[in-house]
Amino acid sequence: MLLVLSVEHRAHLGCLPRAGDAAVGELGRLALEQLRRGAAPRACESAARKLNISVDIIQHGVEGLVYLLTESSKLMISEADFQDSINVLGFSDELNKSLVQLYLDNRKEIRSILGELAPRLPSYHSLEWRLDVQLASRSLRQQIKPAVTMKLHLNENEDRTAQVLQTDPATLLHLIQQLEQALGEMKMNHCRRIVRNMK
Amino acid sequence: MELSPYAQGGWRLLGDPRRFPRRPFAALLRAAFRSLLDDPQAALDDPDLKDIDPTVLKHCHAAAAMCILEAGKQKADISAISTCLEDCKLDKERIEQFCTEYQHRGLVTVVSSSIGRSPLHITDVSWRLEYQIKNNQLHKTYQPSYLVTLNVENSDSGSHPDVSFSCTMEQLQDLVGKLKDAAKSLERATQM
């Protein structure tokens, strides 16, 4: 699949040859830092001073690279497709090679950063459990009522929440049976076939 | 087995044949058991009770209910109940009526054991297996994931929003492993 670059995008990337081949390494580094930590105007300014180029060129170049890298990583395009996509920009072979290398070296990290932006449901972290026997209550003396008390730790939007839950022995066995069935589903032919065919 | 002075007062009224002839007495006993064991919203609208003063009716209904619950709480036997009601000046026949009704309705202990506070109680679980293909930030994710929902009940209000969470296959294996540990230790405890 080829990347389609808009006019504005091409204009931004067009700043790269103007910066010089040596500067591309620096711009690549700035682009990755921006992806990891967000925009850093001061870093761009110091890079502009160091390379003796105007801040605007630096900034446009970085933005162009950020967009190029994120789109390519998001779509997981192949090396060949990436090469073909940037050929339309008419860069030197040297520059093309640097860009391809930049993409391949950092694709995995960029994908994991993008993965954190996806919508998320509360997710499982861990479970603690305890066996209790209720011996008496205000309304009934002399009981023997076994129960399993659990603390379910979930990750919810960057926070860790804990919920205290309880269940009786019969329901516990039912839960185990149901969830084991759920685990078994992935091993069934139907799921295996789908996973195989969707790569 | 002991009853509060208020309950004893109610029983004394119940024991008085002028206030409570035979049929209303039997009707009140039935109503008391019904409101505890069958239907908490049951009204005291038995036709046999229509001639009784409402305040007296309320007092006696409360007294009967308190006696039933106290007997259940202490797991009192017939002799203990009889002694208690004798102190309220109830005649033998009426004591016997109550005890027969009490023995007939063996569910009092079950009701008593369900009264009280406890953490959210899990009643059931449902799960969903999905295979993620892409999202708007990332394409070709290709990952299976489970969505597990635990149906929970609140001891006070009865219903509660379910607890839902997503997990990977490894995390679900961890969860099931821990539940199985709990079940194993439960089995060992029952064999002790």
Image: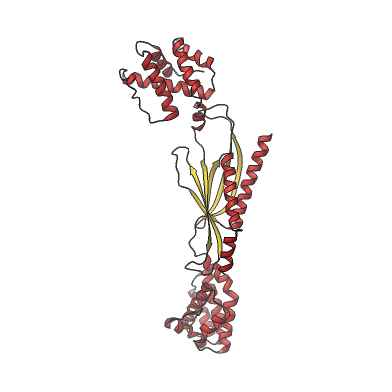
Residue situated in front as seen by the camera: A87 or A159: A87
Residue situated in front as seen by the camera: B122 or A6: B122
- State the residue at coordinates (50%, 21%): B103
Q: Quadrant of residue B144?
A: bottom right
Q: Residue furthest right?
A: B192
Q: Quadrant of residue B20?
A: top left
- On the image, the x and y values in percent for residue B59 come to 37, 20
Residue situated in front as seen by the camera: B15 or B5: B15
Q: Residue furthest front?
A: A189
- State the residue at coordinates (45%, 11%): B93
State the quadrant of the C terminus of chain A: bottom right
The vertical placement of B118 against A39, above or below, is: above
- On the image, the x and y values in percent for residue A90 come to 50, 89
- On the image, the x and y values in percent for residue A88 come to 49, 87
- State the residue at coordinates (60%, 44%): A129
Left or right, A12 with reference to A152? left
Image label count = 0
The vertical placement of A102 against B75, above or below, is: below
- Colour mode? secondary structure
The vertical placement of B9 against B168, above or below, is: above
